[in-house]
C-alpha cells in the first residue's frame, strides 16, 4: 500500500509541475467586453463555416472538450480539431444561437437539414483565456429550453443570433 501511495504522490507532484495553476492562466476577457465579443464572433464564424484552420487557431494548446453526461473527453488542440472535423464531415453545417451559461458565452447548436429546418443538437459553453478558447463543454439538446432556446429553428432564420427573419 505504501508503494501505491508513493506513486500517487509522485504523479500528483508531476501534474502540479506540468499544469499551470488556474491563477497563472491568462484570465478570460470581461463578459460583454469588446475583447470577448470579438473572440466569440471569430468562434461563431469558424464554427458556422466549418473552417477547421480558423477554429484551431482559436484554441489553446491544452483545450479541453467534454460532453456531460457522456464520459467523452478530448484534450489538446489537434484532438479537439479532429473531433470537430467529424462534426463538420459529410457537408454538415450548423447555426449557433448565442446565450450565456454561468456567465460564459454559450450557443445553441442547430444542424442544417435538407428541408431547411435546423434541428437543435445541443448547447456548447465556451471557457475563454485571453484571446483563445480553453474549454468547450457540449450538453445534449434537452437543455436548450432551459436557456430559452427552441428545439428547432424555422427555415427563415437569420444567423448571428438576431432571431427569426421577418
Image (cartoon, rainbow, N blue to C red):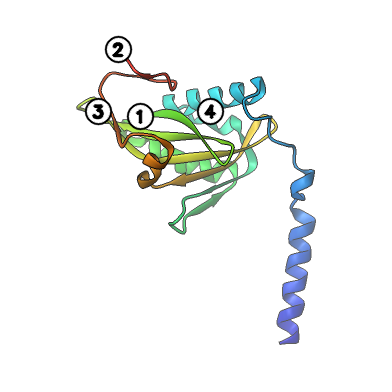
142 with respect to 80 (left or right): left
**Gap in Å between the C-alphas at discs 2 and 4?**
26 Å
**Gap in Å between the C-alphas at discs 3 and 1?**
12 Å
**Gap in Å between the C-alphas at discs 4 and 3?**
23 Å
Task: Give the residue number, with chain letter if any, for mark 2.
Answer: 166
The answer to which of marks 4 and 1 sits earlier in the sequence is: 4
Q: Where is residue 97 in the image (x, y as percent from the top left)?
A: 42, 28
Identify the mark at residue 93; answer none if there is no mark: 1
Task: Give the residue number, with chain letter if any, for mark 4.
Answer: 43
Task: Give the residue number, with chain letter if any, for mark 3.
Answer: 117
Of the two numbered discs 2 and 3 in the rendering, the one whose residue sits closer to the viewer: 2
Regarding mark 1 in the picture, which secondary structure is present there?
Answer: loop
Q: Position of residue 94 (x, y in %)?
A: 37, 30
Marks 2/1 in contact by CB < 8 Å: the verdict is no
Of the two numbered discs 2 and 4 in the rendering, the one whose residue sits closer to the viewer: 2
Name the quadrant containing residue 156: top left
Q: Residue furthest bottom?
A: 1
Regarding mark 2 in the picture, which secondary structure is present there?
Answer: loop
- Front one among 36 and 99: 99
45 with respect to 142 (left or right): right
Of the two numbered discs 2 and 1 in the rendering, the one whose residue sits closer to the viewer: 2
* Above or below, comparing residue 119 to residue 41 in the picture: below
- Front one among 5 and 98: 98
Amino acid at each position: 500500500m505504501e508503494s501505491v501511495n508513493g506513486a500517487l504522490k509522485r504523479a500528483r507532484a508531476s501534474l502540479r509541475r506540468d499544469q499551470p495553476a488556474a491563477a497563472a492562466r491568462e484570465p478570460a476577457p470581461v463578459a460583454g467586453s469588446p475583447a470577448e465579443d470579438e473572440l466569440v464572433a471569430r468562434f461563431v464564424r469558424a464554427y458556422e463555416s466549418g473552417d477547421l484552420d480558423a477554429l484551431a487557431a482559436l484554441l489553446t494548446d491544452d483545450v479541453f472538450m467534454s460532453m456531460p453526461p457522456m464520459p467523452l473527453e478530448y484534450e489538446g488542440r489537434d484532438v479537439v480539431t479532429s473531433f470537430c472535423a467529424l462534426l463538420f464531415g459529410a457537408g454538415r453545417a450548423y447555426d449557433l444561437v448565442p446565450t450565456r451559461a454561468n456567465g460564459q458565452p454559450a450557443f445553441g447548436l442547430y444542424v442544417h437539414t435538407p428541408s431547411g429546418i435546423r434541428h437543435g443538437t445541443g448547447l456548447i459553453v465556451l471557457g475563454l483565456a485571453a484571446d483563445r478558447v480553453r474549454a468547450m463543454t457540449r450538453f445534449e439538446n434537452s437543455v436548450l429550453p432551459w436557456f430559452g432556446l427552441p428545439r428547432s429553428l424555422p427555415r427563415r432564420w437569420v444567423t448571428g443570433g438576431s432571431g427569426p427573419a421577418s
